Image (cartoon, rainbow, N blue to C red):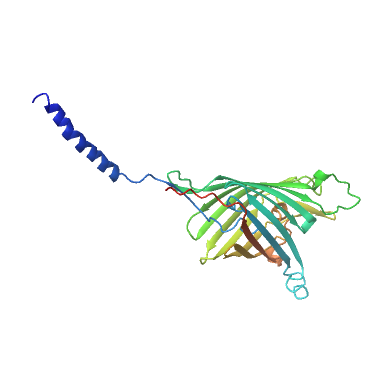
Amino acid sequence: MKKFFPFLFLLVWLPSHAQDDLFDLLDEPERESTDYTIATFKGTRIVNMQTNELPAAGVLQFMIQHRFGAINDDFLYNFFGLDRADIRMGFDYSFTDWLNIGVGRSSIGKTYDGFLKLRLARQATGKKSFPISITAYSATNVITQRFPSDLPTNFTDRLNYTHQIIFARKFSESFSLQIAPTIVHFNLVDAASIPNDVFSLGIGGRYKLTKRVSLNLEYYFSPNPHETVVGNETIPFKNPLSIGFDIETGGHVFQLFLTNARGMTDPQVIANTAGEWLNGDIYFGFNLSRVFTVKKPKLPEADF
């Protein structure tokens, strides 16, 4: 009997110990997951400024940007600027959730642009929490408008570039904010005394008013504003300020706004804004975007 006693003890102790372990596992909290923040901004632009948002992988976005004339430009004769208009049309496509490539053409300067947008980090909570979203943006512009015949130029003189790092945070369901350190480079400037590089800090925000409407605001501050030469005088450009609304209508995002920037490409907005709000140089405009699913995302296979 003494020989079998240890075995009897094991037969009793092992099942009870295994049962205790099972209850311990059941009492443990579920494995913590990572929840990524979505819809920091409703669209890929606040007004003119890029946001941290990218269309989903396999989605093509078509965007129309429209700017009417200045309200103070003979406002009754030109019907508050509505008789004059400029337009940019563009397409961009997301090959992955982190890579977006786009092209566009603006009537101002007959400018073609191409850009690349990379998602570097996403705001998240949970296992892999991160406080902000970080996005890199880089664009190249080509001015195809005819230059004066007495001004010999090379193709490279028509090029300019924009580079940004966008830091964005969604503070609540209603409020989002971003800052975007920016550099714009011009291959050709109006005078040797004018620097080719313009540094600027973009600040943009969104406040949700209703389920489908939000108030947007953006501002670019340049400590060394770009300049142009008029006659014998060097005139600095102004910092652009834009205020507007996002209106979501299903697959469309419709943006209405007022701005002192007549241009729609990055160098035109950030470095070549001549309008001033206090002088009434205000342009009414809208952006309209529509998305198309070109490549449907893969769904997880059913487990039978």
Extreme-left residue of the structure: 1
* Picture coordinates of residue 184, whole percent (x, y): 70, 47
* Picture coordinates of residue 112, whole percent (x, y): 76, 52
Extreme-bottom residue of the structure: 76
**x 75%, y 47%: residue:** 160
Extreme-front residue of the structure: 304
Quadrant housing residue 281 = bottom right
Question: Residue 177, relative to residue 157: is it above or below?
Answer: below
* Picture coordinates of residue 271, whole percent (x, y): 71, 52
**x 42%, y 44%: residue:** 127
Say whether residue 118 is left or right of residue 151.
Answer: left
Extreme-top residue of the structure: 3
Total count of labels: 0
Quadrant housing residue 274 = bottom right
Q: Which of 247 and 131 is in front in this view?
A: 247
Say whether residue 133 is left or right of residue 104.
Answer: left
Question: Residue 279, relative to residue 103: is it above or below?
Answer: below
* Picture coordinates of residue 187, whole percent (x, y): 78, 45
* Residue 169 visible in the snapshot: yes
Question: Residue 214, relative to residue 61: is it above or below?
Answer: below
**x 52%, y 52%: residue:** 169
- Which quadrant, please, contains the N terminus? top left
* Residue 49 visible in the snapshot: no
Q: Nearer the viewer, residue 128 or 5?
A: 5
Say whether residue 99 is left or right of residue 26.
Answer: right
Question: Residue 200, relative to residue 263: is it above or below?
Answer: above
Q: Nearer the viewer, residue 248 or 227?
A: 248
Quadrant housing residue 77 = bottom right
**x 46%, y 49%: residue:** 302
